[in-house]
Amino acid sequence: MVGVHVAPSVDSAVDLPLIQRTVALVLKYECVGEPIEVGVFVADDTALQQYNRLYRGIDAPTDVLSFVNDTDETPFQSLSRYRYLGDLALSYERVQAQATQYGHAVERELAYLVTHGMLHLLGYDHERDEAEANLMRSHEEAIMHLLGLSRLASDSDSFALSP
């Protein structure tokens, strides 16, 4: 189950079905068979900067933040058949700017950031070491290919992960 909340400042532009399809495909690709609940909040740079400052101590906007549910204990656990995996927060302003910067469609950047955040929720961490970064990158690109949003050869050299 994917709950998506979009801030009014970006509401009309966000492709909600793409977000839901991307979350579902990441879970399928990663062989997550149990029912999962994920929250996705799409906002602007101001909101993501506030979250980044509060939770990471970095006073700057960012593209995506992942908030892993690191406990199985919740008073609502017995009421739901879904396991709460965590939440993603995305800046739609960063989605648009990075799509322009990397020379690809906004849809590709949106799906990429959802994929990236979901992989973090599932335990991947590109900052751990180079091998983990390469593994995470290969999963991201495979998922993007399955979504029909593969990266163009021309932007493969200029792409970099944001903080």
Image (spheres, rainbow, N blue to C red):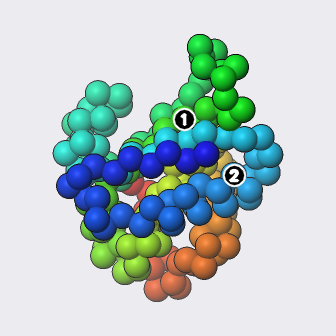
Q: Position of residue 103 (x, y in %)?
A: 37, 80
Badge 2: residue crowd in 10 Å (few <14, some 14–19, many ≥20) = some
Left or right position of 77 against 41? right
Look at 66% across and 23% down and name the residue there: 79
Q: Position of residue 153 (x, y in %)?
A: 53, 85
Tell me how many marks there are.
2
Going by the picture, which residue comes out furthest to the front? 79
For the residue labelled by badge 2, is the local secondary structure a helix, a strand or a loop? helix
Look at 38% across and 47% down and name the residue there: 5
Q: Quadrant of residue 34?
A: top right
Left or right position of 105 against 81? left
- Of residue 56 and residue 31, the one placed in the foreground of this image is 31
Relative to 155, residue 125 above or below:
above
Left or right position of 65 against 35? left
Residue 44 visible: yes
Relative to 79, residue 22 above or below:
below
Q: Which mark is residue 27?
A: 2
- Dot 1 corresponds to which residue? 86
Three-letter code, disc 1 = Gly
Three-letter code, disc 2 = Leu
Q: CA distance from mark 1 to mark 2?
A: 13 Å
Look at 67% across and 60% down and name the residue there: 25
Left or right position of 141 against 106? right
Q: Position of residue 91 (x, y in %)?
A: 31, 53
